Image: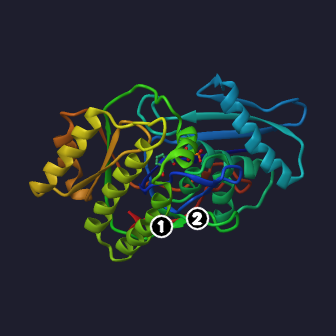
Amino acid sequence: MSEAAARAFPNIALVKYWGKRDTSLILPVAGSLSLTLDTYATTTTVRLDPDAAADSFTLNGVPGAAIPTQRVTRFLDLVRERAGSTARARVDSLSEIPTDAGLASSAAGFAALAVAAGAAYGLELDARALSRLARRGSGSAARSIIAGLAVWHAGDDAQSFAEPVRGPEFTMIILTLDRSAKRVSSRDAMVRTAHTSPFYDGWISSTAQTLDAALAACRADDFTALGLLTELHALRMHALIQSADPPIRYLKPASIAAFDRVEELRAAGLECYATADAGPNVVVIARPEDAVQVATELAVLGETRVVGPGPGATLLTDEAGLTDEVGLTDGAAG
Ligand code: 2P0
């Protein structure tokens, strides 16, 4: 096939990925656990263009800037190497993620690109191979290949892929507090943390333990244990990042106020837990039946959006005209 389209969704980690042991292969220092969302799809079309001298990349109809285009080309080089092709491609990506929502776009972006480019260049890739490939574009993209709850394993290139996990059902409330662009990218901040934080070794070993505990909570269908670990791990990640030299602070007063509010809601009997990525916005997890009430309680702080578990990266056009979804499509992962 010389043309293919795929769709993928962002994911939010409960046990976070922060740090690489190999920046070229994008191998994480520890595993992570996330929920792929049902909202903010990225749809990407890859068309081979053997006459073109270079790849082209558009995002929402606008030609991509130099660095994103270079990342797309490097990623396509990996696909071409495997396919034994030298053909350049046109990559057109439509992202529903609002640029100011504070959600990373690279996970859904590279998951969709992996599926579309793999198909366009004629590679036969199963879920594991797609997750390993997506990882090379952006680490967190390994997890967006998979529906719902996904664990991304640490390890060597062959072992470092994401796969589905069964666990308690829950809903996420995205709380947008601050729309300004972050000053230090995750990629750069990870490197600075690794090189300068005195706590880095403790982060690596404790994250592996937190992941084991979170997977045990999933097996036990224990939302409370998973929620407590989620909040703990987010605060540990931000403590680590703040301990870099020079320090990096992503949380703002409004973020801290949101963590305070979540603690108050819990004390009042409404069970919910907070997490935050490399930015000031907060994501709260709650049981599905409590999600609307939690969102209502948080609405005084910022804009809320209730999102649920979503599908894995999906090929939209294959030769049989069928769609092909990877991972769990329903049920226990929520
Ligand atoms: C996560 N983040 O687990 C963590 C929490 C941000 C905070 O994965 O360098 O964009 O492309 O592999 O995947 C952001 O990292 O970084 C991220 P690269 P990526 O979701």
**Within 10 Å of the Cα at label 1, are there few (<14), some (14-19), or many (20+) other Cα atoms?**
some
* Placement of 13 over or under 157, stated as above or below: above
Label count reads 2
Please report the residue visible at 17 percent of the width from the left and 48 percent of the height from the top: 293
Whether residue 3 is visible here, answered yes or no, is no
Please report the residue visible at 67 percent of the width from the left and 49 percent of the height from the top: 23
Among numbered discs 1 and 2, the one appearing first in the sequence: 2
Point out residue 186 in the picture as x, y percentages from the top left corner: 52, 40
Please report the residue visible at 31 percent of the width from the left and 59 percent of the height from the top: 170
Residue occupied by mark 1: 208
Residue that sits furthest to the left in the current view? 268
Residue occupied by mark 2: 154
- Nearer to me, 51 or 174: 174
Q: Which mark is residue 162?
A: none
Query: Dot 1 lies on which element?
Result: helix
Q: Does the closest atom of ligand 1 sit within 8 Å of the Cβ of label 1?
A: no
Instruction: Please give left or right for residue 262 compared with residue 51 in the image.
Output: left
Point out residue 115 in the picture as x, y percentages from the top left corner: 67, 51
Please report the residue visible at 31 percent of the width from the left and 33 percent of the height from the top: 252
* Residue 332, quarter of picture: bottom left
Proximity of marks 1 and 2: CB atoms separated by less than 8 Å: yes
Residue type at mark 2 is Ala
* Residue 213, quarter of picture: bottom left
Residue that sits furthest to the top in the current view? 62
- Nearer to me, 77 or 256: 256
Residue type at mark 1 is Ala
